[in-house]
Amino acid sequence: MLRKSLNLIIFFISSTAFSFSGIDSKDLPNFSSLAEYTSPAVVNVSVVKTIPSRNGMNGSRSPFPPGSPFEDFFNFPFEERRQPERKIQSGGSGFIISSDGYVLTNHHVIEDASEITISLNDRREFKAKLIGSDKKADVAVLKIKSEQDLPFLNLGNSDEVKVGDWVVAIGSPYRLNFSVTAGIVSAKTRSVPGRETSYIPFIQSDVAINPGNSGGPLFNMDGDVVGINAMIYSGSGGYMGISFTIPMNYAKEIVDQIIETGSVARGWLGVSVQEITKDLADSFELGTPRGALVGSVIKNSPAEKAGFKNGDVILEFDGKKIVYSGDLPLIVGRIKPDAKVQALIFRDKKEKIISVKVGQLEEVDPNKPIIAEKSKKRNKLEIVVSSIDEISIEDQERLNITNGVLVKEVYPGPAQEAGIQVGDIITSIAQKEINSINDYRKIVSFLKNGSSVPIRIIRNGNGTFLTLKIQK
């Protein structure tokens, strides 16, 4: 009986091994034809940046720290010396999109360039003219001139790309020209943490991308460009399995504007938003966490004119669902200024539709934080507050403060656990606005022990909701 069982096991193993050894290599993708067909239109972008001359100091420098008794021995007169203008070189990748010489690459590849040279796979070189670029989209359009028609690539439909699809990148990592790498699409419409790229719905893939690949094309298996390779997400500076690509459909919108007008106009709503956590969803009685929670509505913005309020949860915008807060700027930024759209919001435990005329995004200077002095008198939340009259009218306008109380001290307790800090402005608790210290005290006195309520604050000019859990 045992021998019979062993024979069955041996037969099973040998059969399994036979099935694996019988895999035909033709079942796996072959990228050689794609690489051969597309490489002539993929280019290397070499950049020269000029560092202007400046005055410098030439002389002996003390090896001892300031105030050292030995410092006087090194206190020789310094002699001014003008440092000459110098040039540094850098580069990346790109690709030709028309027979008359339009080239796409990343903005960060050509930023501050004084000279741009385009090199083709056949060793031809051209001086390039910058037509225009956009930092927020990280897209740049260049132009080269040739007596003959240039090879160019077909632009594909990035919306048709699916997670799990094979994709191919060609570029010049570490100046290794025309290197081909392949992988699959890992995710779509990604926002990259900690980067100023909130308007780009990135394609994430595991295609090997390294410094020098920036600006190069990402292909589908038909040889169409579905994106512009832009960045890696790495702690070491090298490839670690996560690469990000600007979708071609999004990039084309930017390119068309640059070629037509030389600049890019983006939609603007005029709100700051935050993620809906489970605690916040429960406190708003929203149910499943979803949407973008409005923390601040900017004065005279399209949002204010349309009737948006602090505490609204935007569930849909222009017919597109908002699952995460990062979805909203991606959608709004792609809408043409002055377009009229509708938004579905959640307010006071009910859904409501608001019509809004989208504005145009402008650059805004960062605000400086408020530094508050400390006071006395604590309360149920274990914080000390005072009137916002202590803040100058100019600072109130600059930081978008119209009501609330100023936090002057924070002690261990509910407010500290919620994340309240000295200098915060508390504008509402449990969706009840605070216009004075008396309002604040009355609202706090009615908070039930063990309850969980939303509390809105303004910090450095940005409105944010936190979850305040009252101790039992």
Image (tube, grey):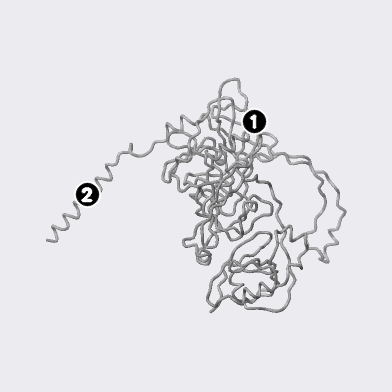
Q: Is residue 66 left or right of residue 313?
A: right
As displayed, is residue 104 above or below residue 410? above
Q: Which one is in front, 184 or 267?
A: 267
Residue at disc 2, secondary structure: helix
Ranked by sequence position, the earlier of labels 2 and 1 is 2
Residue at disc 1, secondary structure: loop
The x, y position of residue 127, in whole percent, is 65, 29
The x, y position of residue 419, in whole percent, is 61, 68
Mark 1 lies on residue: 128
Q: Which one is in front, 395 or 182?
A: 395
Mark 2 lies on residue: 14
Q: Identify which amino acid the numbered label 1 is placed on.
A: Ala
Q: Is residue 19 left or right of residue 290?
A: left
Q: Residue furthest left?
A: 1
As displayed, is residue 38 above or below residue 332? above
Q: Which one is in front, 375 or 104?
A: 375
Image quadrant in which you'd find residue 161:
top left
Tell me what residue is drawn at x 61 percent, y 77 percent. Answer: 445
Q: Identify which amino acid the numbered label 2 is placed on.
A: Ser
Mark 2 crowdedness (10 Å alpha carbons): few <14, some 14-19, many ≥20: few
Marks 2 and 1 in Cβ contact (< 8 Å): no
Q: Which one is in front, 98 or 256?
A: 256
